[in-house]
Amino acid sequence: MSWLTARHSTDASAERLWRAFATTELAEWFWPRAFETVVSIDLRVGGEYRVSSAPMGMAVSGTFTAVNEPSALAFTWRWDGEDVETSVVITIEGGAVTVTHSGFATEEARDEHIQGWNDCLERLPAQ
């Protein structure tokens, strides 16, 4: 199995970054605005989330496996229409965010997600 790590630093506080990942505020930055992103989040261990884009015809969803406010989130990750479920851990330390995404069946799948996470993290709120 293959995995990736993506990192991003910003001037935002840890609490601000937590809200960006752990609330429906995620819809405002996770994907480009043209995607008209819709987010639902039940933020608790065992709770589910869903991030979808009707214009792009895509969605990802999963279940929270760890919720440690304001420093870490862990959850499963499955694209609609795919059988493969992977795991994501997001750690926040000050203004730094680290995403570790593991469980890819192929290096090609991992590489597609590297670009996606880097693009996503570039859109993180700065403040």
Image (spheres, rainbow, N blue to C red):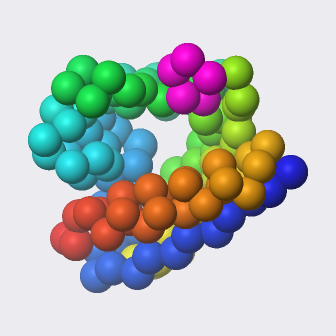
Q: Position of residue 73 (x, y in %)?
A: 58, 48
Quadrant in the picture for the C terminus:
bottom left
Q: Is residue 1 left or right of residue 125?
A: right
Q: How many marks?
A: 0
- The residue located at (66%, 34%) in the rendering is 76
For the point 72% across and 29% down, the residue is 84
Q: Horizontal placement of 70 versus 82: left or right?
A: left
Q: Please, is residue 73 above or below residue 5 in the view?
A: above
Q: Which residues are magenta?
A: 78-82
Looking at the image, which residue sits at the far right? 1
Residue 14: image location, x then y, percent: 41, 68
34 or 28: nearer the viewer: 34
The residue positioned 22% from the left and 72% from the top of the image is: 126
Camera sees residue 1: yes
Queried whether the magenta region covers residue 81, the answer comes back as yes
Tell me if I can see residue 72 in this picture: no
Q: Residue furthest front?
A: 108
Q: In the image, residue 103 lies at what x, y percent?
A: 78, 46
Quarter of the image holding residue 6? Answer: bottom right
Helix, strand or loop: magenta stretch: loop
Q: Residue at image x 44%, y 56%?
A: 116
Residue 20 within the segment the image draws in magenta: no
Of all residues shown, which one is farthest toward the top? 81
Q: Does residue 105 appear to the left or right of 86 in the view shown?
A: right
- Position of 76 compared to 17: left or right? right
Q: Position of residue 30 (x, y in %)?
A: 31, 48
